[in-house]
Amino acid sequence: MNRKLTDRPARLSPAASPHVRFFTETIEAGGISPLSFFEAGSSLAHAERFFWENASKTMTLVGIGHALTLTAHDGEDRFTAIEADWKQYCSALIKEEKDMDPVLVGGFSFDWERSAEESEWGDFPNAFFAVPVFQLKIEGGRTGVAINLITDKPDAAAQFDKLRMQRDQLIHDAQMRDSLQFSKPDVLSMHELQKDSYLETVRNVTDKIAEGEADKVVIARSLALRFGSPADHTAVLQSILNEQRDSYLFGIERGGQLFFGATPERLIEIRDGQAYSACVAGSSKRGATAEEDRELGAALLADKKNREEHQYVVDMITDVFDSLCASYTSANAPKLMKVRDIQHLHTPVEGALGEESSIFQFIRCLHPTPALGGVPTSVAMEIIRQEENLDRGYYAAPVGWTDASGNGEFAVAIRSALIEQDQAWLYAGGGIVADSVPEQEYEETWVKFRPMLRALGGTLNG
């Protein structure tokens, strides 16, 4: 289904109306399954939902409904615009010390200059963020459920009382729900979109790189699935939760669509004045046995092409940390990061946050990393626009959350898919350099399709 890209305006503005107030209230709520809470939210009409779990499984967020939405329009500095709007709303926040911080959740498109006027991404603008009405957060052994209300109406107390009743019902439904048991969607068909065009694009890009136009360009392609009936959003999240335990897990509902994934790549985390990122680039499949896995990993660590790709990312991310941090450290050499279907070269980076730095400034400077765009960035982006013929939407883009205190975490949305009713679109790409072989790059994308394909009930012929 192709639709026009649309933007929806932000709602109330504290700058425009000094009467806007931002209320939050938290209660303790032990014994809630995050996925059951997510599913309970389906009982609320038109309540779009959000799901997040970090790779270490130390923090889980679920959002239901929108107390506020923020979007950015074409041509804007969308990162700065979203940050400025969020700061305005936080200035109107009324909370007690015991209450958890409200969160702003969402993401950005890969490219604000979208490569197709009409695409499957019609419900997702270049930036989309929301403060959930009902916010579940599990962290440090504490489970809390918050209500967030942003209003300029005089009857805020009555509004909040209605929300308390809905909150109590959501908690009750989540706690009383039997263990969730879902089936994967029934895949009727799988269609490679523009396979021949992808192979030709890789040839064209390798020629441009050989002629010195760029050092590396990441080219992506997509895969379309058709199901026998509409896919259940909770079901696909349950599937990916069960199968990809070492990844960042996310799901964003927008309109009738769900963008979800299991990505190994953290873009940026801000926690108590410290900044953390991860250089993830260079990949290989997993082995069928432990011995084969070790051999593949050793080959990856020794592979010149993959090490060069990885170093591009290390150089770029450490340059950003050097500019936005008071000090930083990074590992001297990459190690292997192994997830279920693929292994990557991985180098962590950590720094002390600069006084004026923020999570949105990091996102603005880091996106896209050479692992998803290329080198040099501006040249690679122009080649992608000319050659790729794909609206990536939020694939390979920053998705995550931040709170009213400036903490937060964003991941790079790879290993991801977009679902609408009985359709799904999967996305995968790879770094193209001068000696890339189109057929090998094509085969590598199948390895990267595998997590989402399995979660959605598809197969790869073994």
Image (tube, rainbow, N blue to C red):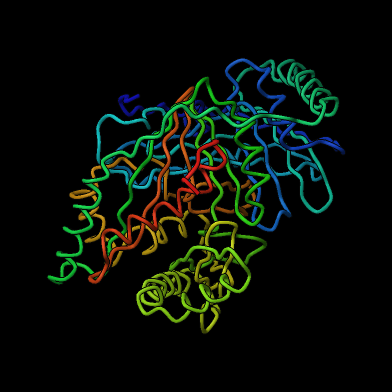
Q: Is residue 103 left or right of residue 434?
A: right
* Outermost residue to the left: 211
**Residue 218 spot, x, y in % from top left:** 31, 58
Q: Quadrant of residue 439?
A: bottom left
- In screen coordinates, is 31 left or right of 260? right
Q: What is the residue that sits farthest to the bottom in this orientation? A: 332
Q: Is residue 51 left or right of residue 370?
A: right
Please tell me which residue lies in front, 317 or 344. Answer: 344
Residue for point 53% across, 40% down: 260
* Residue at x 39%, y 63% (from the top left corner): 371
Q: Residue at x 16, y 67 (%)?
A: 213
Looking at the image, is 86 positioned above or below residue 64? below
Please name the residue shown 40% across and 78% down the image: 303
Please state the horizontal and vertical placement of residue 161, each as a whole percent of the image: 78, 18
The one nearer the camera, 50 or 39, is: 39
Residue 235 horizontal/vertical position (percent): 64, 31
